[in-house]
Image: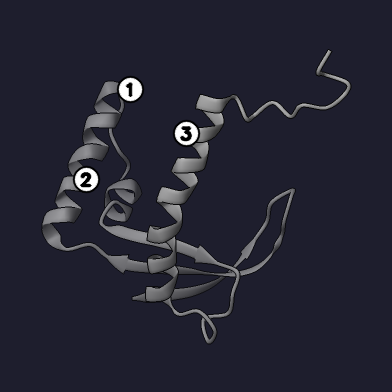
Amino acid sequence: MIRLPVWRRAPEASGPGWRHAVRLPPEAAEAARRRCRQVAQRKGRAPSDATRFLAGWVMGFATVAPETLDGPTVFALSRCRWPVALAFKRLQSRLDLDTLRTPQNSR
């Protein structure tokens, strides 16, 4: 597990954070590199050396200090959060929840 302090620069939120990275097992890394090559080939390109290298890693980002939230916990929370986010996205599209009903647009 690698942990690097980073500074996030984004229009909506800038500030300190930590990049957590863990190397994939060799078989999983090779499968990820194969997918990178396939995607690049469909686009008429070749993946860069950096892309092929990074395909062998899983990375996460946290704004909570590593003393409070360690790397394995960041990844565990991410695995729990992702299905919930997908469920909300599915509900939004199926129930048309992405349009907020207000007196102005309900007419």
Question: Of all residues shown, which one is farthest toward the left?
Answer: 27
Point 51% across, 34% down: residue: 91
Point 33% across, 47% down: residue: 51
Picture layout, residue 33 above or below residue 77: above
Residue 32 horizontal/vertical position (percent): 22, 47
Amino acid type, label 3: Arg
Amino acid type, label 2: Arg
Q: What residue is pinned by disc 3?
A: 90
Look at the numbered disc 2 and give the secondary structure of its residue: helix
Residue 18 horizontal/vertical position (percent): 53, 71
Report whether 27 appears left or right of 61: left
Q: What residue is pinned by disc 1?
A: 43
Q: CA distance from mark 1 to mark 2?
A: 15 Å
Which mark is first along the chain, 2 or 1?
2
Q: What residue is pinned by disc 2?
A: 33
Verify CB contact (< 8 Å) between mark 3 and mark 2.
no
Which mark is first along the chain, 1 or 3?
1
Q: Residues within 10 Å of mark 2 (few under 14, many from 20)?
A: some
Quarter-wise, where is residue 5 in the image?
bottom right
Of 5 and 71, the residue lying toward us: 71
Picture layout, residue 45 above or below residue 84: above
